[in-house]
Image (cartoon, grey):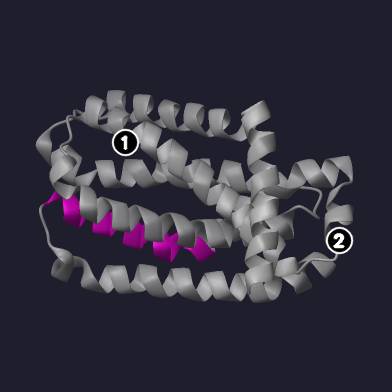
Amino acid sequence: MRSLLAQSWQIYRKDMVVEYRTRERVVTMFVFSLIVVVIFNFAFNAGEDVVRRVVPGMIWVAFAFAGMLSASRSFSPERDRGTLDGLLLAPIDRGSIFLGKLLGNVTLIGLVQLAMLPLFVLFFNMTILPHLSKLLVIFFLGTVGFSSVATLFAAVAVNTRMRDVMLPVLLLPVASPVLIALVETTRTTFEGGDWQDMANWIRLLSVFTVVFLVASVMLFEYIMEE
């Protein structure tokens, strides 16, 4: 277990060093999310009812598609440069490759979320400070759960010719339960609901995250051999 985590950390560190030098993924994700916010801001009158009913969906539309942009670039640069085969031939556990890529996607999505939430507050006159503790739990579970599925399907799609098209086609139907749960829990939070009001959705998020995280680590080796 310690070896698996150490190997995952090295892969994660390598990806973050590359991202720090290029800032390719995080800038693209931020710009995309910003465009979504600006378009929705002009499309809706940002009143109190809109904040409660519409903004949770806007938030997760922006973050879901930003997450897909991050996941799609998890493996494709290494595939294009021919270094993915070298990584697969390295004497490391294949599961550590998945975990390293997953940690990278979670980190980048989290950075975009931290940058975008103040903008959502600004554009839509939201109040999030009273709900911050609930939102942190929801965002963490949702980001890890969504990233687990996105990273797994990015590994599947990278070996196809139409990988940029295949990823959303494969990902969105599977990830739709977690996205629905995220929208519902976020909406309930903004409406002043407590943990009991969204207990079922939190259970769904937790189960989804654990099941797909474990299953992805176990299946990753077989996926990369195809």
- List x then y, in percent, for residue 160: 80, 54
Give the vertical position of 185 relative to 63 (above or below): below
SS majority, magenta: helix
x 26%, y 51%: residue: 135
Q: Earlier in the sequence, mark 1 or mark 2?
A: 2
Which quadrant is home to the N terminus?
A: bottom right
Using the rendered view, name the quadrant where residue 88 is placed: bottom right
x 18%, y 35%: residue: 126
Give the vertical position of 212 relative to 63 (above or below): below
Verify whether residue 113 appears in magenta: no
Q: Residues within 10 Å of mark 2 (few under 14, many from 20)?
A: few
Q: Mark number for residue 90?
A: 2
Residue wearing tag 1: 117
- Span highlighted in magenta in the image: 174-191
Horizontal arrangement in the rendering, residue 211 relative to residue 132 (left or right): right
Give the vertical position of 130 relative to 117 (above or below): below
> Is 217 in front, or is 67?
217
x 25%, y 43%: residue: 54
